[in-house]
Image (spheres, rainbow, N blue to C red):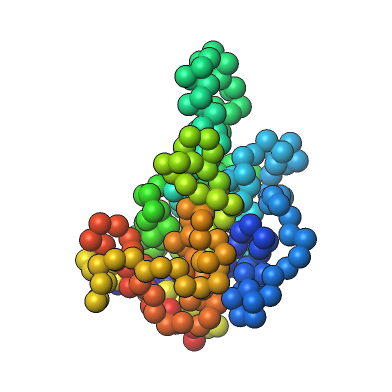
């Protein structure tokens, strides 16, 4: 069994600009008005913020919020960035341009086309020289990112920043890799037990008891942001906000995680 303390949570979703807003929706049904359409991560210089793709912006906004909540210096944390699709608008642009006029490829957009773009912006913005990992595992990207972060803790890291994010589909890709809106979730996980902070325990199973199929989204966050490819991250946040003690998460072919949540 893997175990971690959740020191800080960061969140940005379309219509919900922070973790407090997400908790208010879950606990009272309240939704803040006049929410910004695009996150504006202050960790980046102004010119970098303007050029950063939407997925980079939402990932860094959530990441910085989690570090602030945990009272951790961002540059000291190893990080795991996980995304189902990365920045689809740039992938769509690259494919379309390569098909129509390959020599017209924009160097700036090519720079942002790699899957670790958000991790790169983060290390530049924070001045971090710590290890950073960027992964994708299809619909199980959050689960596998969580596993990677908790294994790093088990291997000796004191604390790890986990950042999960996805943005809207674009062009022809949206038909085969659908996603809507923006969603970024970040957790600072540590090996240090701390009174008053939730503790997460992860056990790997081959099957969820009683079923082999995934569960439909049931919480207010999951329903509101169900069309985003990173929706599988939301049931854990709902469980934390509502003081639930157990959650089953589909993590891949014949793989389920049983997540125990202690809020002592």
Q: Residue furthest right?
A: 34
For image coordinates 55% across by 61% down, the residue present is 225
In this rendering, does residue 198 appear at all?
yes
70 lies above or below 55: below
In the rendered view of the protein, which quadrant contains the N terminus? bottom left
- The number of discs equals 0
Identify the image quadrant of residue 24: bottom right
In the image shown, does 148 or 209 lie closer to the viewer? 209
Question: Where residue 227 sits in the image (x, y, percent)?
Answer: 51, 56
Q: Which residue does the image show at 61% across and 40% down from the upper left?
A: 53
In the displayed structure, 54 sits above or below 182; it is above
- Quadrant of the image occupied by residue 256: bottom left
- Relative to the observer, which residue lies in front, 40 or 96? 96
**Residue 103, above or below 173:** above
At a point 42% along the width and 74% down the height, the residue shown is 200
Q: x, y (%) of residue 103?
A: 54, 13
Q: Residue at x 59, y 52 (%)?
A: 182
Q: Position of residue 83 (x, y in %)?
A: 47, 49
- Regarding residue 152, the answer to whether it shows in the image is no
Q: Is residue 7 left or right of residue 135?
A: right
Rendered location of residue 33, percent (x, y): 76, 65
Asked if 98 appears above or below 122 in the picture, the reply is: above
């Amino acid at each position: 069994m893997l175990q971690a303390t959740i020191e800080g949570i960061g969140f940005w979703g379309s219509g919900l600009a922070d973790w407090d807003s997400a908790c208010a929706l879950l606990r009272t049904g309240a939704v803040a008005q006049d929410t910004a359409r695009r996150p504006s991560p202050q960790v980046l210089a102004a010119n970098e913020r303007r050029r950063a793709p939407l997925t980079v912006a939402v990932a860094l906004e959530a990441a910085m919020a989690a570090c602030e909540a945990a009272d951790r210096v961002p540059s000291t944390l190893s990080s795991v960035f996980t995304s189902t699709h990365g920045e689809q608008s740039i992938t769509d642009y690259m494919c379309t341009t390569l098909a129509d006029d390959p020599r017209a490829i924009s160097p700036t957009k090519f720079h942002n086309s790699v899957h670790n773009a958000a991790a790169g912006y983060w290390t530049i913005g924070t001045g971090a020289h710590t290890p950073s990992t960027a992964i994708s595992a299809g619909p199980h990207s959050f689960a596998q990112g969580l596993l990677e972060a908790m294994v790093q803790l088990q291997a000796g890291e004191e604390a790890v920043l986990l950042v999960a994010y996805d943005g809207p589909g674009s062009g022809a890709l949206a038909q085969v890799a659908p996603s809507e809106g923006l969603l970024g979730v970040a957790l600072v996980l540590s090996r240090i037990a701390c009174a008053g902070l939730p503790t997460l325990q992860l056990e790997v199973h081959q099957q969820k008891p009683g079923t082999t199929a995934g569960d439909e989204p049931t919480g207010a966050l999951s329903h509101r942001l169900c069309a985003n490819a990173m929706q599988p991250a939301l049931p854990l946040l709902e469980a934390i906000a509502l003081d639930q003690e157990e959650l089953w998460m589909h993590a891949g072919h014949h793989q389920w995680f049983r997540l125990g949540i202690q809020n002592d």
